[in-house]
Image (tube, rainbow, N blue to C red):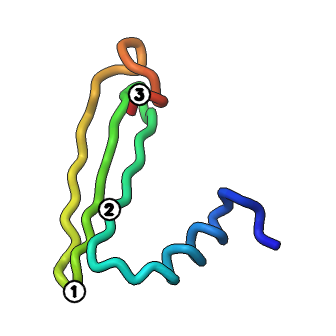
């Protein structure tokens, strides 16, 4: 059995998802900055992405991102 929340489980669930529209998001801290990103997959179209820098990690946490 694959552990809940593992990368393997995520891949398995994603491959079984037949939705026409999918959105993936992530946020993190890197090089002293907090940021977030989203990628939109819609049918056979090219994916669209969006990135946003919240500011420094002194002002924001990676959890906020």
Query: Marks 1/2: CA distance?
Result: 14 Å
Looking at the rendered image, the quarter that the N terminus falls into is bottom right
Q: Secondary structure at mark 3?
A: loop
Residue 6 at x, y percent in the picture: 68, 61
What mark, if any, has residue 15 been given in the picture?
none
The residue tagged 2 is: 23
Mark 1 surroundings within 10 Å by alpha-carbon count, few (fewer than 14), some (14 through 19), many (20 or more): few
Q: Element under label 2?
A: strand
**Badge number at residue 64:** 3
Could you classify mark 2 by the number of other residues whose Cα lies within 10 Å: few (under 14), some (14-19), or many (20 or more)? Answer: few
Quarter of the image for the C terminus: give it: top left
Q: Could you tell me if the residues under marks 1 and 2 are in contact, i.e. CB atoms within 8 Å?
A: no
Classify mark 3: residues with Cα within 10 Å, few (<14), some (14-19) or many (20+): few
Q: Position of residue 53 (x, y in %)?
A: 26, 33
Q: Residue furthest right?
A: 1
Can you tell which mark lies on residue 44?
1
Say which label, 1 or 3, has the lower sequence index: 1
> Disc 1 and disc 3: Cα gap in Å?
32 Å
Residue drawn at point x = 22 percent, y = 71 percent: 47
Mark 1 and mark 3 residues within 8 Å of each other at the beta carbon: no
Left or right of 24 on screen, residue 39: left
Helix, strand or loop at mark 1: loop
Q: Give the residue drawn at x 37%, y 59%.
A: 24
């Amino acid at each position: 059995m694959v552990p809940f929340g593992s990368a393997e489980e995520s891949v398995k669930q994603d491959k079984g998802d037949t939705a026409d529209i999918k959105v993936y998001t992530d946020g993190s801290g890197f090089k002293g900055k907090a940021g977030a990103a989203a990628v939109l997959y819609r049918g056979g179209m090219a994916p669209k992405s969006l990135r946003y820098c919240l500011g420094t990690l002194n002002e924001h946490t990676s959890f906020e991102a």
